[in-house]
Structures are given as C-alpha cells and as structure tokens.
Amino acid sequence: MLPFPVVLRRRWLVFLGLILTIALSACNFHQFRTEAAQGSQFVISTLGNPKTFNFAFNQEFPNVFIFTHEGLVNQNGVTAELEPELAESWQFSENKKHVIFTLRPGLKWSDGQPLTAADVVFTFQDIYLNAAIPTDIQDGLKIGVSRALPTVKALDDRRIEFTLPEPFSPFLSSLSDAAILPAHSLQESVQTKDEKGNLKFLSTWGTDTDPQKIVVAGPYTIAQYVPSQRVIFRRNPHYWRKDSQGKSLPYFDRIVWQIVESTDTQLLKFRSGDMDGLDRLSPNDFSLLKRGEKLGKYTIYEGGPRSGTNFISFNLNRARNSQGKPLVDPIKSRWFNNKAFRQAVAYAIDRPKLLNNVFQGIGALQDSPVSVQSSFYLSPAEGLKVYDHNLEKAKNLLRSAGFQYNRQGQLLDALDNRVQFTLITNSENKTRVAMAAQIKQDLQKLGIQVDFNPISFNTLTEKLSSTRDWECYLLGFTGGVEPNDGANIWTSKGGLHSFNQGPQPGEPPIQGWQVSEWEQEIDRLFIAAAREFDPAKRKALYAQYQQIVQEELPSIHLITTTALAVVRDRIQNVKFSGVDRRGIVWNLYELREE
C-alpha cells in the first residue's frame, strides 16, 4: 500500500492530466473544424524554431527543407538506394571524371517559372562552390588532397555536366544533400553586396522573410511561419510528381508543423488528437502508446536500428579567440586532450545500464561513428575496439596518466586540481536529459564532478558552431549509409568538426588552432576512400577511420536506438524505416488520408 501523500499526489496528477486533455480537445475541436474547410492536412511537430529558410546555410535536422526542396538525386528511405529526383538520369564517363545529368522535362518552380539546367549551374557555381559563401554543402564536394571543387556547365536546357578533378566515388551521395535553388529569385543577391561589403545572399531568406517570397521545387511551399507556434506548408501546384493514375502529388493540401519545445508535450498533443504522427519516439513513449494502439486508432512502427549516432564529446580545441583568451580553460584542456582521460571516461560510463534504464532495452550498444545499416560499418566482431563498463580499469588508466585520488575519493590531476567539468545537452530532449543524468552519476563513481546543465537547442548549437564556449556535450548526429556524408564532421576542416572546430568563414578569427596527427590521418583516409570505387577496398579504408575514432575517442558513442514512430491509421502509404533520418515523412509526397 502506498503512503497517503503519494496516493493523493498521483490522484492530483491524474486529475490535472484529465483537465489538460479535455482543455486541449476543446481547443482542437474548433481548430480542426476550421481547418477542415481548407482541405486535407497532416499535423506533425518539431522541437524548435527553424534557423533559416535558406538551404545553403542549413545545419540542423529536422528542417523545413524536408518539405520544400529537392535535388538532382534522392535516397530511398527504405532501401537507401540513390534514385533520380529532379534529374531523370545520369551517366558517368569511362574515367569517372565527368557526369552528365538529364533533368526531367517540364520542371517548374513553385511560382510557375521553368526549372532548367541554368538553375542547376547557378546553384552549384554561384552558391555551393562559391568560396565567399560558407555552406556545409561545399565540404562534401571538396575532392582530393588539394580539396579541389568540381566544375559545372549546362549542355542545353536539360543537360548538365559536372567535371571532377579526380574520380570521386561518393559524388552522387553528396548531391543527394544538395537542393537546387532558383536563379531567377536569388541571382541578384549573389551578385550584389550590402553596405558592409558582404554578399546580400548571406542574409537572404532568413526566417524573417515573407514565406510567399521563397521559391521552391519540392512538394510544399512555406505558407506561414509563427515563431514558437507553427510552420504551415501549402501544396505546391507545380510539383512534378504524379501517382500511377496520373494525379498530381502531393495528396495533402497542407502540412502543419507544430513547434512544441518538449517531447512530453508532443506526446500529450498526440494523445489528445492534436497531431497525426510522432517520429523518434522514446522507449517510454513507445511503452505508453503501445497499450492503446487499437483503441486509439493509430499504428506504432518499428524501423530497426536508427541511422545515426549519439555520443558525448569533449572540447579538444587548444586555440584562443580573437581577444587572445583560451577557448577552453587550459587546466581542463590538458585533461580533455589526454587520451587516457577520454578512454577512462568511456570505461566508466555504464552503457548497458543506459540501455536498460533509459531505453528500456530497446536498442543496442553503439561503438562506431558509422551507422550499423551501412555496408562500411566495422563491427566489434571484425576488430573494432569497444569500451565495456569497467570502473577499475578506468581508475587504473587515470592513475597511469598522472591523476590521483584524495581521501574523499575525488579525482585530482597531477597539480592537485579537482577534476570537474560541465556537461550540456538540449533540454527539449528528455531522453538525452535522462542519459546525461546517469552519465553524471557514473562519472561521480570515478571521482569526477560533472556539472550537468541542460540548455535550449538554439543556445547549444550557438556554443558549438560559433562561440566554441563549451567543455563537454551530449548530442546526436543523423546518419546514413555513405560514410563520406560525415566528412564535414570528421575531416579537420569540416564545418561540423565540433570537437576541434577550426577557423570558419565570416567568423572572428581564432589563434593557435592545432590539428592532431590522428585527425590528419582521418583526413587522408577520407580522401583515399573517396577515390576508391571498389567496395571492399573502400570498406578497409573506412575501417581504419573507425578504429582511429575508437582509439582516440574524440566522441564516446553510447547507444544505437531502435527507430520508433506512431501515425494515425487514417494516414496511408507510411513507409517507415530507421535507415532515413526523415522518418515518417521521407515519402511525404505520397502520404494520404484514408
């Protein structure tokens, strides 16, 4: 029997939950009745506000471009095979240095203007390959030791030829992340500068732009953006896809993307009928929703291992900012840059406990930066180093590296400094908050004081990409089957090389940035693997890269989650898999109501 105060508190929580559900349902009744008159709609959610409406500057996921933009090629969300998108076909030359793409006939932009080879040339030549424009797309197109870029030219209105400086096996995969942009809307901004001498394009199509002015080629246009509330997407009447009966796609007239800054609130909104689908369910959400699947008229989808990674990472940057101040406290920097310290932390984190307690056993231990679905994944059985939970081994590693313990069991460095650092993650993600809380407890057993500070996702990304003002973070990267897609993370000059972020275009300079020998070796391996077209030889090169990451541990990988999603039964054509980071909306154009 529970103590009286506990019973009373539980009844009070149930009562509050009923009130919230009734209130939400009452509000939604009027909302849905009003929206029904506007045509069919699909309501889903995201945790944070979009950062930009300009695809060239996107560094987040999910993003609005899932709904609005398309490229020459696309990845199938179930098979991971590359498929034609705006291009209907492509052909490599015999020496693999020339690729000719042929666009589909009759393509149009959302404003009705024709989409031609000139738009493709503009997109690459004037934006993605432009040294004056800092875009992560360029990282995936830098080829060879010289990091040379391809050239592009139009052969006619529908054919485009790319010329590569050397054979580059991940070229098609790189293009799957490169949306085509409209020359007639953006060319002037690329050719003119503002009063500060910067290209106007750098400040074009921010989230303060009137959505009606944003021209796209994807299934939906941005109709409305209300910060911290919603983004509404309207069906693009000029979209090129048709179904087998010749009906123009997409089926839904609009998508409502609610901005709900808490996974708990997202779940509440789904259960109250305010949303049609939830992607990236936590194990707790899965357990709760599974019981009501039939009664609630929804289906839970299990997509196998989710592509991507989650990890903690230490700030290894030894540089100073433009004022000469170290980016990381020099005392802590010495700890973080000590491989034995990082390995000890890896041994101290109880990943099986994380899997059982936070993920309820739904997932697997993760040991590699490459997703398990990839043919290039190196498993522990194939020789990948792993860090099984071993607290004693962790302590011995620290002692051998000059650390020591005081009488209270606190870890000190060789100069008697107490080992203490701040761990951050995004507060909106309750699963990550729970993971970080346990990691704090695990490292306390190692004598380390972890100050856990959950912060907003926007603040976290600002720290990682701009100020570099952080010590340790817990986060995840969406993944895929092509390792080179992670070049901007793992190569030393990549735009998302967060654990040792170098100088970036358009940012204040930093001083004394150092690249370690093992980082340089990873650079070399990525270049060598990109030159190689033999799958077995490519796998051997990517295996070396994975072994270096597991030896040096710039990131300590944690758990591979199982892909879980829930969608209402009235939504048809759902094809869910953990392979694609877009989850339930990778085939958005063919989702429809029953």
Image (spheres, rainbow, N blue to C red):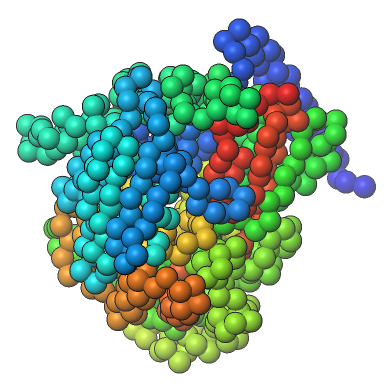
Snapshot quadrant of residue 412: bottom left
Q: Residue furthest bottom?
A: 400
Quadrant in the picture for residue 114: top left
Is 337 on the left-hand or right-hand side of 245? left
Q: Position of residue 420 (x, y in %)?
A: 43, 69
Residue 382: image location, x then y, percent? 60, 82
x and y percentages locating residue 32 in the rendered image: 64, 14
Q: Is residue 429 above or below residue 233?
A: below
Q: Position of residue 153 (x, y in %)?
A: 22, 46
- Residue sitting at 56 percent across and 65 percent down? 374
Q: Please, is residue 585 above or below residue 252 in the view?
A: below
- Residue 322 shown left or right of residue 357 in the figure: left
Visible residue check, residue 22: yes
Give above or below for 442 relative to 510: below
From this viewpoint, is residue 138 visible?
A: no
Residue in the image at 47% along x and 89% along y: 399
155 relative to 271 in the view: left or right = left
In the depicted view, which residue is nearer to us: 437 or 31? Answer: 31
Residue at image x 54%, y 54%? 81
- Residue reaching furthest to the right: 1
The foreground one among 5 and 219 is: 219
Q: Residue at x 47, y 44 (%)?
A: 84
